[in-house]
Image: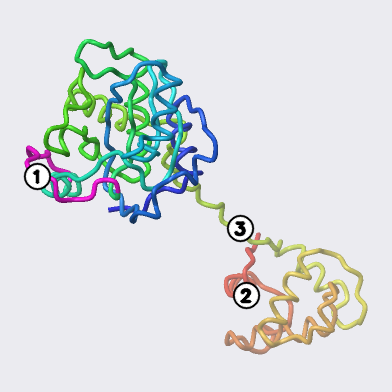
Amino acid sequence: MATPLSAAVFLARLRAEGVKVQEHGDWPHHNRNSKGAWGPVHGVMIHHTVTKGSARTVDICRKGYADLPGPLCHGVITKDGTVHLIGYGRANHAGLGDDDVLRAVIGDKVVPGDNEANTDGNRHFYGFECENLGDGEDPWPAAQMEAIEKAAAAICRHHGWTERSVIGHLEWQPGKVDPRGFTMASMRARIQERLDTKTSDTPAKPAAPKPLPKPQKPTVDLSKLVAAARSNPKASGTPVTYSGVRIVETALVNAGLLAKVYSDGHFGSATVDAYARWQRRLGYSGSAADGIPGKTSLTKLGAKYGFQVIA
């Protein structure tokens, strides 16, 4: 069961399948919807027209007859392989048919023989009329057969249906013989083969996303940091001697040991005192907590606040 495609999507799907399409008049709004519902849709029905001449065939299917107003289908497939879009919505093409056949189509099963006409097919099927006299002798050109295959496959592909969703009028309504000149079993085999292939409109399976590279942690060179710390630890405004000072100061700020105002890239007295507090937090005391970074204390600070130590 499916909601009918919009006219725009229907057209796009046909073209994506490689169907040659010709639009006639205001086909998206030419329908019999005032006479009954269209949808949910369950399949595609194929017919022959018992007419000769493409232009005449298209005209008849657009306008219909006095006792059977048009449109008589959604698309007319002429002998040159063109699908002429003449209407969209409810169309007078299927008539009443066998509810057992409909259940088989819905269930994706082989259709049984039709022996009753008790279900509205115009509501539930897309319909294509194919230009042919229907006498069993009028030929079916290769281009026309390919167009039938493509048009039916385009709809099935969109809805996720299999080839068993495509039936002939003769499989739906007792007494009907269309399409005559080829078997629906052979057409379904063609449709199945097409559905097993990818069209240009079938999205390729997305490649697994490549993992993003792990962000590199900033590095602090221990020897350069110590040199900066020893340059003049008790003087304010010590010149910037190494960029890694800012990395360590930011970590000390995040640890709550250094006021942000003193995080200025100078390993001055405030930074030395803050680092000494970090050392004492780790359990160091006395000269071991002098505010001059050591490998162990600096490595632990880096592990907690996101930088690596180069010793």
Q: Which residue is mark 3?
A: 215
Which secondary structure lies at badge 1? loop
Label 2 with label 3: CB-CB less than 8 Å: no
Q: Nearer the viewer, residue 287 or 225?
A: 225
As measured in the structure, the alpha-carbon distance from the residue carrying label 3 to the one carrying label 1 is 71 Å
Q: Nearer the viewer, mark 2 or mark 1?
A: 1
Q: Where does the C terminus fall, quadrant-wise?
A: bottom right
Q: Nearer the viewer, residue 197 or 252?
A: 197
Q: Earlier in the sequence, mark 2 or mark 1?
A: 1
Q: Residue at x 35, y 19 (%)?
A: 144
**Residue 93 at what x, y percent from top left?**
30, 38
Q: Which residue is mark 1?
A: 116
Answer whether residue 110 is magenta in the image.
Answer: yes
Q: Residue at x 16, y 31 (%)?
A: 176
Q: Earlier in the sequence, mark 2 or mark 3?
A: 3
**Amino acid type for the residue under numbered disc 3:** Pro
Task: Tell me if mark 3 has few (under 14), some (14-19) or many (20+) residues whose alpha carbon lies within 10 angstroms of its own.
Answer: few
